[in-house]
Image: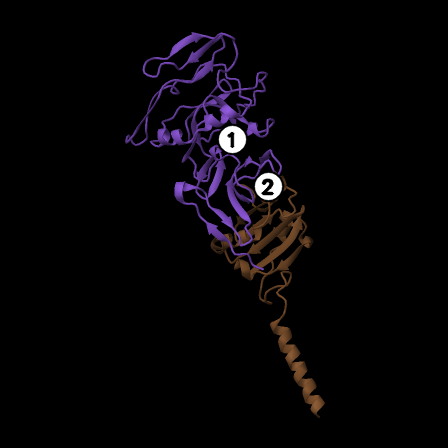
Chain colours: A brown, B purple
């Protein structure tokens, strides 16, 4: 009987620990309620299949996706509206930190951050191309 | 791991903010195209609008402090002689490709290039393949000009100057009253302009009418141009 109680306790403990120490992997959504970024938005930049859902909480977003496009690290986040996106733009600067070049751009209720971590685009030609695709000039 | 940005705001002298993270990574904010750190690549960064780099400007006199940004107002052909979108200008003029349009000036004397054609709201006249600013100078023009020695830079660095072979347009030479009338900015004469005939216009009389002198060597420009074989004529003269 003792071994059964012990086993049950261990199982409960492991279950609890598992919940608490769940890795906050950037490729996992932060809660089931989080919205993914509109595929059409990602398709403007590159191939949507190159993006994975990533943590939205650090960027105060409803949903975020991250992927590599033309060897650049790209983050796209979706917000409730343009005002919310505008208010959160500063938080995406953190994404660029440590890169040779980068920027944050808004298109309606979406924000995009690009970081050139591999230093493949010193003249910003790729960054400019992605930026124009994400937020075409009027 | 989240990176906390520590803003080291150099607000004195209006210097744009430099942000660093705890690892000492520098984030420098730029607005529009600018020279790339030679240690990185050289040439020009082509990104329009606000963006960031991990390096600081190499020569700050070629930039204006444009709010939180460094905005390049120098001649792009110094860093990329074949810059495809170069337009020719003559003399000082307002710049509008900044985050705060109209709040800054280019103080390059004589012919030079920029990557932009004039904005519609400013008074420019196109003549001889170059743009000349014929509007009123803002009240801060003289004060900032003294602090912004762009000519000093171009005295030390060679650029390919556009060839200007016409006399200045009406309105370019004369007394300039500051906007608002609170200050008086006075500027007489063009430094040097080459005319179609071998005659140059010399500003050697700051208080009376400018004099006309015979050009001795029929060369193009007396200024700081170190390139003898210039003649690329980058100016597109697209703006009518």
In this rendering, the answer to whether A64 lies above or below B51 is below
Residue visible at 50% across and 14% down in the picture: B165
Horizontal and vertical percent for residue B177? Answer: 31, 26
Q: Secondary structure at mark 2?
A: helix
Instruction: Provide residue B97's location: percent of width, then percent of height.
Output: 48, 35
Q: Chain of mark 1?
A: B
Q: Percent x, y for residue A120?
A: 66, 43
Neighbours of disc 2 within 10 Å: few (<14), some (14-19), many (20+): some
SS for callout 1: loop
**Residue B202 visible here:** yes
In screen coordinates, is A114 left or right of B97?
A: right
Q: Point out which mark residue B124 bears.
A: none
Can residue A61 be spotted in the picture? no
Percent position of residue B163, x then y: 53, 17
Q: In the image, is residue B165 above or below residue B152?
A: above
Q: Name above or below for residue B11 compared with residue A1.
A: above
Characterize the local packing of mark 1: few (<14), some (14-19) or many (20 or more) Cα atoms within 10 angstroms.
Answer: few
Q: Nearer the viewer, residue B218 or A60?
A: B218
Mark 1 — residue? B116
Left/right of residue B146 with respect to residue B157 in the rendered view: left
Disc 2 marks which residue?
A128
Circles 2 and 1: CB distance less than 8 Å? no
């Amino acid at each position: 009987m003792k071994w059964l109680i012990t086993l049950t306790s261990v199982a409960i403990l492991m279950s609890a620990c598992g919940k608490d120490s769940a890795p906050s992997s950037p490729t996992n959504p932060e809660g089931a309620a989080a919205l993914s970024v509109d595929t059409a938005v990602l398709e403007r930049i590159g191939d949507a299949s190159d993006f994975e859902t990533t943590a939205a909480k650090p960027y105060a977003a409803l949903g975020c996706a991250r992927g590599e496009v033309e060897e650049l690290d790209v983050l796209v986040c979706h917000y409730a509206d343009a005002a919310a996106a505008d208010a959160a733009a500063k938080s995406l600067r953190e994404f660029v930190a440590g890169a040779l070049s980068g920027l944050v751009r808004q298109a309606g209720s979406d924000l995009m951050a690009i970081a050139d971590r591999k230093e493949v685009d010193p003249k910003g030609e790729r960054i400019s191309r992605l930026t124009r695709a994400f937020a075409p000039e009027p | 791991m989240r990176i906390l940005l520590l803003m080291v705001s150099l607000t004195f002298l209006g210097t744009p903010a430099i942000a660093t993270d705890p690892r000492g990574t520098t984030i420098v904010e730029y607005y529009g195209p600018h020279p790339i750190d030679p240690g990185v690549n050289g040439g020009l960064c082509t990104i329009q609008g606000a963006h960031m780099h991990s390096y600081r400007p190499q020569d700050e006199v070629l930039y204006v402090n444009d709010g939180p940004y460094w905005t390049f107002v120098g001649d792009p052909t110094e860093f990329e002689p074949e810059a495809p979108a170069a337009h020719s200008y003559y003399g000082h003029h307002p710049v509008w490709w900044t985050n705060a349009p109209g709040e800054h000036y280019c103080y390059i004397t004589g012919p030079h290039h920029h990557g932009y054609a004039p904005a519609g709201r400013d008074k420019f006249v196109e003549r001889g393949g170059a743009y000349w600013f014929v509007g009123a100078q803002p009240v801060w023009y003289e004060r900032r000009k003294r602090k912004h020695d762009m000519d000093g830079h171009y005295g030390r660095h060679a650029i390919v100057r556009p060839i200007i072979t016409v006399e200045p347009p009406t309105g370019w030479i004369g007394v300039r009253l500051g906007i608002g009338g609170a200050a008086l900015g006075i500027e007489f004469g063009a430094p040097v302009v080459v005319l179609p005939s071998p005659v140059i216009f010399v500003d050697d009389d700051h208080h009376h009418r400018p004099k006309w002198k015979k050009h001795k060597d029929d060369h193009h420009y007396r200024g700081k141009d170190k390139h003898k074989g210039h003649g690329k004529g980058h100016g597109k003269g697209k703006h009518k």
